[in-house]
Image: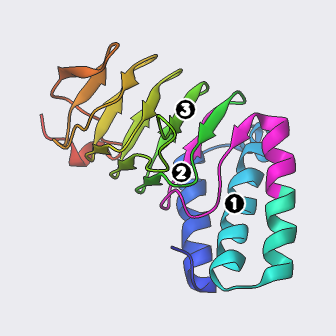
Amino acid sequence: MIKSKHDLKHYIECDKKARWGDSAGYGIKLKTKKLMKFNILLRKAEYHVNNHHKILSAVYKYRLNNLGMKLGWSVEPNVFGPGMCIVHYGTVVVNPNARIGKNARIHAGVNIGASGGSKKAPVIGDNVYFGPGAKIFGDIKIGSNIAIGANAVVNKSFEEDGVTLGGIPAKIISRKGYYPNKSEEQV
């Protein structure tokens, strides 16, 4: 959670690294400028919400929602840890009660939400890849270093780390998982 200016800077740097890595050229950065702007607005909104700056939090949330509508993204403050990257324009909806760890990589068409009128949403670990069209919903827990395949429907908990989920309903289809930093991979 972003409480200080130092935290704010750290989260934004992690988001930039998740989007561009260490060596992205100017052309890539120019093409994805709006996508990164969303992350910056999100992190500034989190900072001001968490520090009870009513006027500035309202301003940043307003700007965040406007840009989110243009991009097709609905993400509230204080849901994602550092290193969040939504890869493309397109519909991405995340319930404000969901909690997602660091280094989440999300593709278009992903929906993370509650089910059956409940306010309880998924709690998801670190280093999770969400393939295009993945749906994750309900009062469930997902471990770390998980890859969720395209169009998978995850409606039950998978607390084992380092697996790949796929199918409708989702099941473990591989033990390789998702490791954004290849040196961490445990094959």
Above-or-below relation of 130 to 104: above
Between label 2 and label 1, give the one nearer the viewer: 1
Mark 2 — residue? Answer: 84
Between label 1 and label 3, give the one nearer the viewer: 3
Residue 40 within the magenta-colored segment of the rendering: no
Q: CA distance from mark 1 to mark 3?
A: 18 Å
Mark 3 — residue? Answer: 111
Above-or-below relation of 131 to 80: above
Residue contact at pointers 2 and 1, CB within 8 angstroms: yes
Nearer the observer, 83 or 159: 159
State the scheme by which the image is colored. Answer: rainbow
Residue contact at pointers 2 and 3, CB within 8 angstroms: no
Q: Position of residue 113 (x, y in %)?
A: 51, 39
Q: Earlier in the sequence, mark 1 or mark 3?
A: 1
Name the amino acid, label 3: Asn
Badge 2 density bin: few <14, some 14–19, many ≥20, Cα 10 Å: many
Q: Is residue 179 left or right of residue 77?
A: left
Name the amino acid, label 2: Met
